[in-house]
Amino acid sequence: MTSSTEATPVPVTGKPPTAGLRPGLLRDPFGYLMDASARHDGLVRIGPGPLHIYAVSHPDYVRRMLVTNAANYPKGSMMGPFRAALGNGLVTSEGDYWRRQRRLMQPAFHSEQLQAMESHITGCAARAVERWRRAAGQGNPVDILDEGIRLNVEIVLGTLFSTSIDAPRAERLRALTSRVFVGLASKVWTFFIPDGLPLPGANAYRRAVAELDTEIYRIIAERRAADDRPRDLLGLLLAAEDADSGERMSDLQLRDEIFTLFMAGYETTATGTTWIAYELARHPEIADAMVGELDRVGVDGLPAFADLPRLEYQRRVIDEAFRLHPPFPIWFRGTIEADTVGPYRLPKNAKIVLNPHITHRDPRFWNDPETFDPDRFTPERFDSTARLAYYPFGKGSRICIGERLAVTITQTVVTALVRNFEFTISDGFEVIPRYVVTCQPKGGLPLVLRER
């Protein structure tokens, strides 16, 4: 690392307006940050105003912030809008509290637990196939984003709460979560708005969070009072015990973790599945190759948990889709103390926006990066440089705890789609990405399905 006396000033996007913010940042924060990241070395300051916002995409700098000096880069104040909904769950908590919660929750994501979820996940996918088959028979396009959300809500509710949630209650949870997610999406960029400024929709957002709180606390109370506790995720969290203190999670801790798992689980997996479907619709020969692999491996219908590691080509397709379309295209961090990153010096209290969306498309680290090429993830091509520049689920100790569950669900749903259907994007539909915490196609993704 370069010493602080030799550090190079961080490049700046341009002169700020009177308010200290570029007009483009106010109009389209996501697009502005993506453009700024792509046009610089991998670390750029967003205007020389008072906010000290830095966009980061160079994999060496990302590793510095997430792995080698991660203690200096907590989630920070930029996660404030998320904390309003997620509380002190794994996504937002820090320090010793986060480490304790991570230890308590880790067993819920071990292979044995994932395998126990197999019948529920495949059952949900099979019911989705029947819905899609009816739509195809009637000549109706299927919005795979909307269907993905519906399917993943069903999967996540079942893995969280087993069979204790009936259909009307599940629908209420889905509707409330959607309201919270929409409210959260509108709050993400409020970190650069002066404190005390009234924001539209703030009261509606708080009401949605409060209503979802009521539902979740009611579920926790019912489960605590029950004689028989299923071994779903809630049951495992209720039984989790700190090895040092013997303490178990309070209702507040359970609420925060359930809120986090539900919000992060259904939206990111549904978004990922949607972008995979988008790429396969554009590359039907790749979908055909996936079906050929299913035949060679002997998967007739939906895969069992034990089948998934053998679907090597399918996993490369998923990895390539996550490269071009990471479900979370940006992450937030902040500096506690000043730090030297590569040749640059970052001040204390800087606001950091990490950009996997740009890292994954940087031609310095990926050959022909805009091309959808699953074979770039073969062992001989996915070398140390590419590994460093690929982080759809994060890096270091805070890598997503639900990565294996997300991939398991994604593989099952993608198998259900390609095994049963050929598909194209509806004529005339223009796919325009939009940032809503995840990155989704604006207006969904209508597919015309034909039975394979």
Image (cartoon, rainbow, N blue to C red):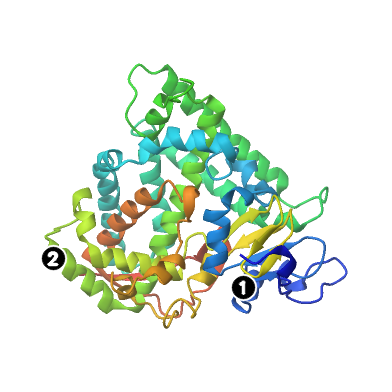
Where does the image place residue 392, in percent across and percent down from the top left?
A: 45, 61
Where does the image place residue 196, in percent across and percent down from the top left?
A: 83, 47
Q: Which mark is residue 136?
A: none
Quadrant in which residue 85 is drawn = top right
Name the residue rendered at 61%, 56% in the picture.
332
Q: Name the side, left or right, on which 398 lies relative to 351.
A: left
Helix, strand or loop for disc 1: helix
Count of labels shown? 2
In the depicted structure, whether residue 450 falls above or below residue 254: below
Where does the image place residue 283, in percent across and percent down from the top left?
A: 32, 78
Name the residue rendered at 11%, 60% in the picture.
298
Q: Nearer the viewer, residue 354 or 318?
A: 354
Q: Residue furthest right?
A: 18
Decide which of tag 1 and tag 2 comes sooner along the chain.
1
Q: Nearer the viewer, residue 233 or 176?
A: 233
Where does the image place residue 373, in percent across and percent down from the top left?
A: 34, 77
Q: Residues within 10 Å of mark 2 (few under 14, many from 20)?
A: few
Q: Which mark is residue 37?
A: 1
Name the residue rendered at 62%, 47% in the picture.
82
Helix, strand or loop for disc 2: helix
On-image quarter of the N terminus: bottom right
Name the residue rendered at 74%, 71% in the picture.
9
Q: Which residue is mark 2?
A: 295
Is any atom of residue 442 visible in this view? no
Q: Nearer the viewer, residue 384 or 180?
A: 384
Q: Name the side, left or right, on which 289 lies relative to 406.
A: left
Amino acid type of the residue that numbered disc 1 sits on in the rendered structure: Ser
Amino acid type of the residue that numbered disc 2 sits on in the rendered structure: Asp
Q: Name the side, left or right, on which 373 lies relative to 302.
A: right
Is any atom of residue 237 visible in this view? yes
Q: Residues within 10 Å of mark 1 (few under 14, many from 20)?
A: many
